[in-house]
Amino acid sequence: VQLQASGGGLVQAGGSLRLSCTASGSAFSLNYMGWYRQAPGSQREFVARAAVTGSTYCVESVKGRFTISRDNDKNTVYLQMNSLKAEDTGVYYCYGDRYWGQGTLVTVSS
């Protein structure tokens, strides 16, 4: 399984970005797809996940600002990030069950 993430970039505080991650190479749907992030000098932390059933979960620090969604037909998970803050800066990594994609850099300028 390969996971390809895209959508990172530079945005001002208060702005929005949408990340996408598409899985390929497997005939079976991944049970969970989601996102972790790693800020400079920090450990990787969990952000959000979406189950193949449609259920979703976001960590408290991003609730109300980030929305995760998933298109099972496209094997794609999205992370809509609104009201971005400087502390959201980091490399965002998508995952699908035990597989990882490459990171995409999100930089929020204050």
Image (tube, grey):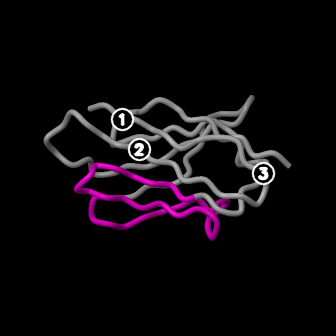
Left/right of residue 83 with respect to residue 35 in the rendered view: right
* Residue extent of the magenta highlight: 51-80
Which is more toward the observer, 91 or 11? 11
Where residue 4 appears, x then y in whole percent? 39, 35
Q: Earlier in the sequence, mark 1 or mark 2?
A: 1
Label 2, label 3: how many angstroms apart (C-alpha)?
A: 23 Å
Q: Residue tagged by mark 2? A: 21
**Circle 2 SS class:** strand
Residue visible at 71% across and 63% down in the picture: 83
Marks 1 and 2 close (CB-CB < 8 Å): yes
Crowding at mark 1 (Cα within 10 Å: few <14, some 14-19, many 20+): many
Labels 1 and 3 touching (C-beta < 8 A): no
**Which numbered marker is on residue 3?**
1
Q: Residue furthest bottom?
A: 64
In this rendering, the label closer to the viewer, 2 or 3? 3
Position of 95 relative to 73 (above/below): above
Q: Amino acid at mark 2?
A: Cys
Q: Circle 3 sits on which residue? A: 12
Q: Amino acid at mark 1?
A: Leu
